[in-house]
Amino acid sequence: MHASHDKLDIILINIDSWFPSSSALAVLDPYLKQHGINSRVISSSEIDQYIDQAEIFGISVMDHVYPIARDLTKKLQEKTVIWGGWTATAVPKFVLQDNPGVDYVILQDGEKRLLTLLRSFAQPDLFETIDGIAYRDAKDDIIINPPKEFVDLDDLPVPNELTIFNGTVYVELARGCYGRCGYCQDVSKMRFKSARNVVAEMLYWYNRGQTSFYLGGGNSLANGPLLRDCLRELEAQDVSLDVSLVGRPEDVLRHFAVLEHLFQSPNLQPYVIEVGVEANTQHLLDLLGRKGTPEINRKAVTSLLDLQAKYSPKTKILANMILFSHYDMTLEDFIANVQFIGEHGCSRDVMSLSLCGLANTPIWEDMRARGFQPKPFKALQIFEYPFTDEIVHRLFTKFYRHLDRQLRKKHRATSFWDYKSVQEQLHDKILEFYASENIKESVLRFIESPEFTT
């Protein structure tokens, strides 16, 4: 990218050192351009090159890139800095207190709010009309105007190339979530794009050579009728596409007929179906604030594997699992997780080592009440804590030390893929436990063994 001789109205910074795509900036940038704003997205590594090209900078912030966003903001002390994203939305007061260089925080949907804020710099009366914004007033007091409405997803333009990752186009089918899980910061109500606009967006990219699509937004399986209409319209267009979906186990069962429709489609290929299982005992699911049951989880994954075997052996079925699901888990809980991972064989690509406490979630609040603290460099995450069960704590410590050693060899995880490669080593150890004659005895021997080997 080459800087223009004319100053930009705003530069949007994509913190791509961890994960290169950004669905938020992918739609925000074209939305601003559509409304006459001279905007540009740059990589966080390009900040020095572009620092003189605008007076206003926007940063989309998630918890895992918070330290980077904080450092970038320190470089922009003479600029107007606006933060948005899940993490900024979850803790706007903390963001403003912890970052004197942040001038405004946009809450939830950022498109209309950021546009109005930018216009308000020339038309101050507009500022009073903005909901969903946090800032400091003339007395330096923090003011938080909560969001009152959501953007109509059908009013948004087709995203730019930041919506493409590894040859797959991310299509935002929905925003928000109905789950209210205890560890998640997304608590906004679900809203959906129309099937007409979803298909139009897919055809836009299809006509530009893209054939693999991930229908997302956290839970593309939540709205069965919408998904059915999308599939039917795509079939009517007679296009050959790979389609990936993500959802909750209960939605897999609720909308199983729609999934079977996809698997039977003559020209639509189910590429990846990802389902959030997270844990394999009712004790753990309750601790996590999940509304499902182990039986629902098992039935959902088994049903997907049946569809795979019957119609599409190449389809990947993924079952998200948090290995150490909660600090109050028992050894029996851990063994149940091992059994699920080993039995279904769907978690290698999507297994997390342990539960992470994210700021302003019920899990975070419980962690803080127990005295668990975030590390200074990870101010909005708690990922190191003691487990109630001594054996589980020793087991976790051994896994975590191996993870830490491997990441140090990589100079810490510099990208999502660095971290993922080490997680896969941990998954292979789980399969060793599962293949043993007695999982519990195998785990106990492992705890006493001197080295972690895979």
Image (cartoon, rainbow, N blue to C red):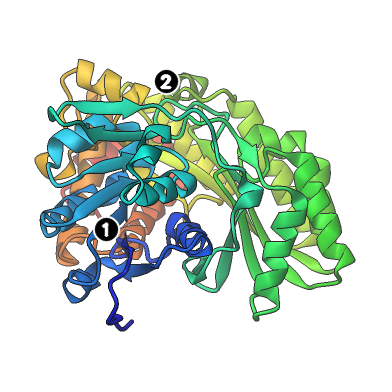
Residue 408 in picture, x, y percent from top left: 15, 60
Outermost residue to the top: 369
Which amino acid type is marked by label 2?
A: Leu
Which residue is depicted at the point 59% across and 54% down?
156
Which amino acid type is marked by label 1?
A: Phe
Q: Which of the image's four quarters has the N terminus?
A: bottom left
Outermost residue to the right: 236
The residue that mark 1 highlights is: 57
User: Can you tell which of label 1 and label 2 is closer to the viewer?
Assistant: 1
Residue 102 in picture, x, y percent from top left: 19, 45
Disc 2, SS: helix
| Quadrant of the rendered image containing residue 303 | top right
**Position of 206 compared to 164: left or right?**
right
Tag of residue 287: 2
**Position of 195 compared to 15: left or right?**
right
Which residue is depicted at the point 76% across and 44% down?
226
